[in-house]
Amino acid sequence: MTTSKKRVVVARQQGGEGAGVTTRRAMEQLEWPPKGALRGRVLIKPNLLVLRPASSGATTDPDIVRTVVQMSLDAGASEVVVAESSNWGVDTDAAFEALGYGKLARETGCRLLNLKEDSFVEVEVDGQFMKRFLMPRTLIEADYVINVAKMKAHRMTYVTFGLKNMGVGSHNDDQKEEMHRIGNYAVLSDEVMDRGSGLDHNIVSVNLACRCDLTVVDGLVAQEGPGAPLTGGPVPAGLIVAGYDRVGTDVVTSTIMGIDPTTVPHMVLAHQAGLGEIDIGKLQLGGVPLEDIDVSFEPAINLDPGSFAPPGVEVVVGRACYACLGDLAYFIKRHADELAQLAPATIYVGKVGPVKPPMERRHLVFFGNCAGEHLYGGGFATGCPPRSRRQVFQSLGALDLYTSDENIDLSR
């Protein structure tokens, strides 16, 4: 029997069973491999964006990947490569060792690959912003690609599962930064803004450039709330979602988290680009019925950044996409004490119309490319949305207030 390419399975961890047992059950219910034996090189792409363990909800459980590696070898793969490019400014090799992947490789015989150090080839796609860009050669030339993502809320894209794990986690640091800046400070047209942020469009461009044969989402310990996908709160959901349709698998995972996938721009754009099915009614579901799953998640995005501002800090909101609003809200909430030291200050976000210079001397920052269209003095945090909190402090002329965290190299 030929397995449906639209099949998506949800497996629930039972009792005290290990991650590998749950993973194997999900894969077996998916009827994997779908047809015959694997041939050649299998590339497995986890999510190891930062040096935080799987129990924090931030990174992929190594025991899930261990099982996928072994099942790939058992299915006939001649080589298995576990490949990752950690977050901007994070040492991927250090992440491999700290998070248990060095031990995994030594015990299974798979090869670890830091994608930041791979050779790159130029690809061309019909994308909104990224049309010609570089991709790791090993990823592009793999015979079978398995995306082992993490189930997380996200303050820039609502959620992050398979599409975003592949879309952002496949590059060197310079291109990760470019993905967020969308070129030379481009301002979104109203038509483009209605469809998603620059980051949403770029996630789809990268997915158009590479294959993804199977997506496995680690929801054993997921992540929620402000700070996700790095420092949000862990949610012991005890679930693994697996499917052949990369959009469909994300759709099921988003539904589990209580977020309508048709409101997640990068999923809608990926479906429109022909990458998979967004209508959950057209997917072949297996495993635990969705109506039997009762897990609640706090969103990562707050669309009212001014609600977190300390006294003396004014937030002027124009027509802005959710990515900049959500990221700015998180920035202000996390750094309210530091921002209070800069009062009086004004932060503009979105298309705000004519900017009137404040009468008193104060700090000004224009947050995101659309706000920068109205730049009047002050600083400009470029991006769609801006790439980092450090960048915003630098735009405010207060880099000394930003301190090291999340294992990110501050020299970038």
Image: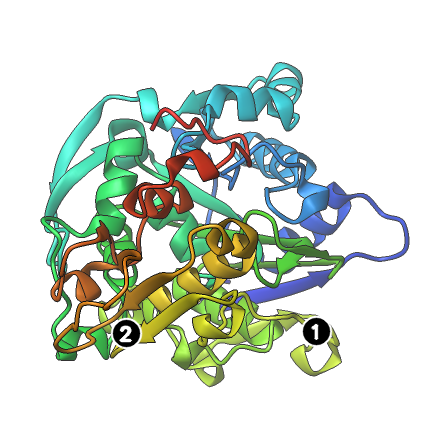
Image coordinates for residue 166, horizontal then vertical, percent:
38, 47
Left or right position of 121 against 221: left
Task: Please name the amino acid that badge 2 sits on.
Answer: Ala
Observer able to see residue 156: no
Image coordinates for residue 265, horizontal then vertical, percent:
33, 72
Question: How would you rate the neighbour count of disc 1 (Cα within 10 Å): few for under 14, some for 14-19, many for 20 or more?
Answer: few
Image coordinates for residue 79, horizontal then vertical, percent:
45, 23
Image coordinates for residue 353, horizontal then vertical, percent:
15, 78
Instruction: Residue 137: name its quadrant.
Output: top left
Task: Please name the amino acid that badge 1 sits on.
Answer: Ser
Q: Is residue 104 above or below residue 265?
A: above
Along the polypeptide, which appears first: circle 1 or circle 2?
1
Residue at the spot 21% in from the left edge and 50% down from the top edge: 181
| Residue depth check, mark 1 versus mark 2: number of the one nearer the observer | 2
> Is 169 in front, or is 76?
169
The circle drawn on residue 296 is 1
Residue at the spot 45% in from the left edge and 54% down from the top edge: 162
Instruction: Residue 174: name its quadrant.
Output: top left
- Give the secondary structure at mark 2: loop
Residue picked out by circle 2: 320
Observer able to see residue 336: yes
Question: How would you rate the neighbour count of disc 2 (Cα within 10 Å): few for under 14, some for 14-19, many for 20 or more?
Answer: many
Please report contact status of discs 1 and 2: CB closer than 8 Å, yes or no.
no
> Is 388 in front, or is 189?
388
